[in-house]
Image (cartoon, rainbow, N blue to C red):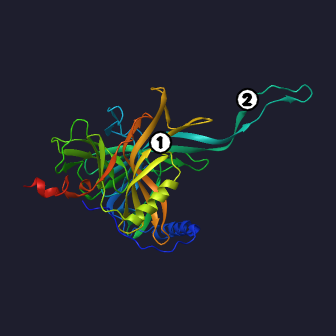
Amino acid sequence: MTDGYISNGSNTVSRKKSNSFYIRWLVISILLVVLTQPSMVCASIRKAAVYFSDGKVLTGKIALTSGRQFKLNIPEGGTLKTSDMVTGEDVPYGKVRQFTFDPVKEMRFFPEKEEMRQDWKFVETTKYDEKTGVADYTPAKKEFWGKVYPIRYLASEVIFNSGQTLEGHLYSVSIYLEIEKKTHRIILRSKQRGEKGSTMEDLIYVTKIKMLDEGQTIAADVTVKFAGMTFGPEDDVQAVTRESLTPVPTERGEQPDTFVVKSAFGEDFYLAAKKDGKYLVGWPQPQDQQLFALAEDYVKRQRDFYNDKKLLGVMKSKDGREVLTLLNLRRRYAPTNFGEIGGEWDKERGCIVEPWRLSIWRWKYNEADRELLLSSRGTFFRVIFLPDDPTPEAIVCEDLWRMQSDKDTVFVGVSVKRDFLK
């Protein structure tokens, strides 16, 4: 497993006007849209057949825009389960999962809800007598006009090469299908709206995308073996994917030094462990002190639900465009003259509680101006505490950062793989 981030030093440069940072990001975003549509250059290209609801089938080379991923919102979590950090019970794993075409075998789309609509407005019919000052307060009524039009809500089912499936709602995304040197742009949506006067049959949608090649071979489950570390009944391990920062389910392996990471769909991952009441997170050492100070300042100034924020680690991406920060977060409450603010009210306990998280925040990084812009988050652990409970200790652990992959097994530890091959 290759390290997705490394920690490098950076030269101190003069600070320009802060507005130039945001203007630069806006210009870059516009250029990316212009330059990548409908280019398939640098994108992962597969062979596929695309089926439409009108019976048409198109076959060719298929790809996403370079650098883009599918985002699938999983309301019910499908068949995936994870352990609730508070109760310990198995609960549905409802998360937004991200992936490319690489690990996909087939994608299916089916109507979840269909209806015909018509434009309307509320018409006020209340009568008011100016002489007596009496009104009858008749409820407003809907007034319809114009032709009806169809609305369709689509659900998605994704079948991966590993045999696993996920069901949910796909965020709108453009895909490109190249047939005989002509590229067709196809927009996949979770909601469609037809033209006025059209029928539901007129609203064509993609029913299936079937891959015609093998694609990327991925393991359904990845076994993680820890060198020189065993886990007791109260210990736990959690993984967060590196690209999408998605927490993925884990379970204990057959041996006390193993855990199984489930449904990573080919992504590498970061690891954190709860051991002997402490939390350890795989992170590289040493830290870039200048970057750490910069990130600490931005974290402190970031307005967030978690008002007690402690920076534990920082690292920069290889291309220098992103920075990851490891944070120990807690939502503290405080009494004021206007009542108690902060924290959360727990209905079952009948008191204020304080959520705690061990999280990774990803930032866009402008190295020239040394400016950071928060872009995404991922969380290893989330626990609910009473206000008097101490904040858990979280420690950066370089041992958990050292990983080496061998097919469906990842070896973790000081001397990684060779310890297990003696």
Count neighbours of disc 1 (C-alpha within 10 A) and say few if under 14, some if 14 to 19, many if 20 or more: many
Q: Tell me the residue that label 1 is attached to.
A: 331
Which of 132 and 101 lies nearest the eye of the viewer?
132
Disc 1 and disc 2 in contact, CB within 8 angstroms: no
Q: Which residue lies furthest to the right in this view?
A: 131
Residue at disc 2, secondary structure: loop
Q: Is residue 296 above or below residue 26?
A: above
**Type of amino acid at the residue the image marks with label 2:** Pro
Q: In this view, does 197 lie above or below 180?
A: above
In which quadrant of the rendered view does residue 311 lie? bottom left
Specify few, some or many for label 2: CA neighbours under 10 Å numbering under 14, 14-19, or 20 or more: few
Give the residue at mark 2: 139
Residue 63 appears left or right of 126: left
Q: Which of marks 1 and 2 is in front?
A: 1
Q: In this view, does 220 lie to the left or right of 63?
A: left
Comes first in the chain, label 1 or label 2? 2
Q: Which residue is drawn at 78% across and 27% down?
A: 137
Label 1 sits on a secondary structure element that is loop
- Residue furthest out toward the left: 422
- Name the mark on residue 71: none
In which quadrant is the N terminus drawn?
A: bottom left
Q: Where is residue 380 in the image (x, y as percent from the top left)?
A: 35, 46
Given residues 405 and 181, the one toward you in this image is: 405
Look at the image and tell me in which quarter the C terminus lies.
bottom left
Q: Residue at the location (83% across, 29% down)?
A: 127
> In which image quadrant can residue 392 be found?
top left
